[in-house]
């Protein structure tokens, strides 16, 4: 075999090995970002070897218990299929999952399903039990909710996302994991199979059902503005503030009217104080402008204020009016949390202008759908 052929074979082996390594790396990366992972074959009820499954961690560092007590919850968890929903009430992605979760609670709670809402806050105001109580009443949550204010249970699960659903079988083994919105039919089928597995194991009669809850799923815009953060820490490494004054940690800045407005950037006008998670209006009035692309616009805010919403320089038309705008194009902010200001059938680009009356008003994020 001549040297050229040998050299060619050697290079071929090196290239093949390199491609194999790259394939493994990309495969592992793809697994890490998959939105949903099923840990069990939901189509099989044969005896399962659970040696490879992890047990659900203990609920640790809980600041408050809503709709339950520590003693009641511990007793209620015994022998139940448990859905752990990690969420926070100003997260729009979390809120969109709640109609399914509350429907599953209504449908399966008497058949052995226990849902536990693990409320792991993103912002300080979400740590207040009174604020969370208002939210769970608003969204019709009757199942237990625990306040994981220091994110200790979040860490015990090894979690990094809002929302996230884990489902444990009646013996406490984690059998299913889903990140984000979607996957509702798959999740419900897992619930049904684990309840059936439980009834067979415990010798309990269970009403058999294969039907799934009928809730219309929110359809996202394919091209939409990403979430925009007003806090300098939260917006770190993101070029989202369009004003030339920029972020200035801890300072009160007089932001000027912009000459031009770029897509996917926000522009405060007036005197605003820069916090790590938000901006606070220091003057009596102020304005926020944004050129966005989406069909839905939400804001997360705190402290009382009156917001006048304009779209492309005109009062907000009724066909774009958000679900939280009751008085024409005026939004009255009272409780801290998420407010829907624009809601339309089709995704499109517009300049939204928010005219704020109310010193002390704080804004944390824009989110879109």
Image: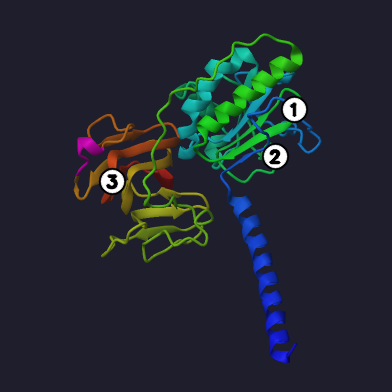
Give residue 255's quadrant in the image.
Answer: bottom left
What residue is pinned by disc 3?
Answer: 355
Picture quarter with the N terminus? bottom right
Instruction: Identify the secondary structure beneath mark 2.
Output: loop
How far apart are the two marked residues, 3 and 2, measured between alpha carbons?
42 Å
Whichever of callouts 1 and 3 sits on the residue coming sooner in the sequence is 1
Residue extending furthest toward the top: 205
Q: Provide the residue span drawn in magenta.
A: 315-320
Asked if disc 3 and disc 2 are in contact, CB closer than 8 Å, the reply is no
What residue is pinned by disc 1?
Answer: 172
Residue extending furthest toward the right: 51
Residue 243 lies, with reference to residue 310, above or below; the image says below
What residue is pinned by disc 2?
Answer: 157
Whichever of callouts 3 and 2 sits on the residue coming sooner in the sequence is 2
Task: Count neighbours of disc 3 (C-alpha within 10 A) and say few if under 14, some if 14 to 19, many if 20 or more.
Answer: some
Residue 194 lies, with reference to residue 2, above or below; the image says above
Q: Residue, x 68% and y 31% (percent of image)?
A: 62
Give how far across and how far down residue 293 sits, in percent: 32, 51
| Viewer-closest of 233 and 263 | 263
Give residue 114's quadrant in the image.
Answer: top right
- The mark closer to the camera, 2 or 1, is 1
- The mark closer to the camera, 3 or 2, is 2
Q: Residue, x 54% and y 22% (percent of image)?
A: 104
Instruction: Identify the secondary structure beneath mark 3.
Output: strand
């Amino acid at each position: 075999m001549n040297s050229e052929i040998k050299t060619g074979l050697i290079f071929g082996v090196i290239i093949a090995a390199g491609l194999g390594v790259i394939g493994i790396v990309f495969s592992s990366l793809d697994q890490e970002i998959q939105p949903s992972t099923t840990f069990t074959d939901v189509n099989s009820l044969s005896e399962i070897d659970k040696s490879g499954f992890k047990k659900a961690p203990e609920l640790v560092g809980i600041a408050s218990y809503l709709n339950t007590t520590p003693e009641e919850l511990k007793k209620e968890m015994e022998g139940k299929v448990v859905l752990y929903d990690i969420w926070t009430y100003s997260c729009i992605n979390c809120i969109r999952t709640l109609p399914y979760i509350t429907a599953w609670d209504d449908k399966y709670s008497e058949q052995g399903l226990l849902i536990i809402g693990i409320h792991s806050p993103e912002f300080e105001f979400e740590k207040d039990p009174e604020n969370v109580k208002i939210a769970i009443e608003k969204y019709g949550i009757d199942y237990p909710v625990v306040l994981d204010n220091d994110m200790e249970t979040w860490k015990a699960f090894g979690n990094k996302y809002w929302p996230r659903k884990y489902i444990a079988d009646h013996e406490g083994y984690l059998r299913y994991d889903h990140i984000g919105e979607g996957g509702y039919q798959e999740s419900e089928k897992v619930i049904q199979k684990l309840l059936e597995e439980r009834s067979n194991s415990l010798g309990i009669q269970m009403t058999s059902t294969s039907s799934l809850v009928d809730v219309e799923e929110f359809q996202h815009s394919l091209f939409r503005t990403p979430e925009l953060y007003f806090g300098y820490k939260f917006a770190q490494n993101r070029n989202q503030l369009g004003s030339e004054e920029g972020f200035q940690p801890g300072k009160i800045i007089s932001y000027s009217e912009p000459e031009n407005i770029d897509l996917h950037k926000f522009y405060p006008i007036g005197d605003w104080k820069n916090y790590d998670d938000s901006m606070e209006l220091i003057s009596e009035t102020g304005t926020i402008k944004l050129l966005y692309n989406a069909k839905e616009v939400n804001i997360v805010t705190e402290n009382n204020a009156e917001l006048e919403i304009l779209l492309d320089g005109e009062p907000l038309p009724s066909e774009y009016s958000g679900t939280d705008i009751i008085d024409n194009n005026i939004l009255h902010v009272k409780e801290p949390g998420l407010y829907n200001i624009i809601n339309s059938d089709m995704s499109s680009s517009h300049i939204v202008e928010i005219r704020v009356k109310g010193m002390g008003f704080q804004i944390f994020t824009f989110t879109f759908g």
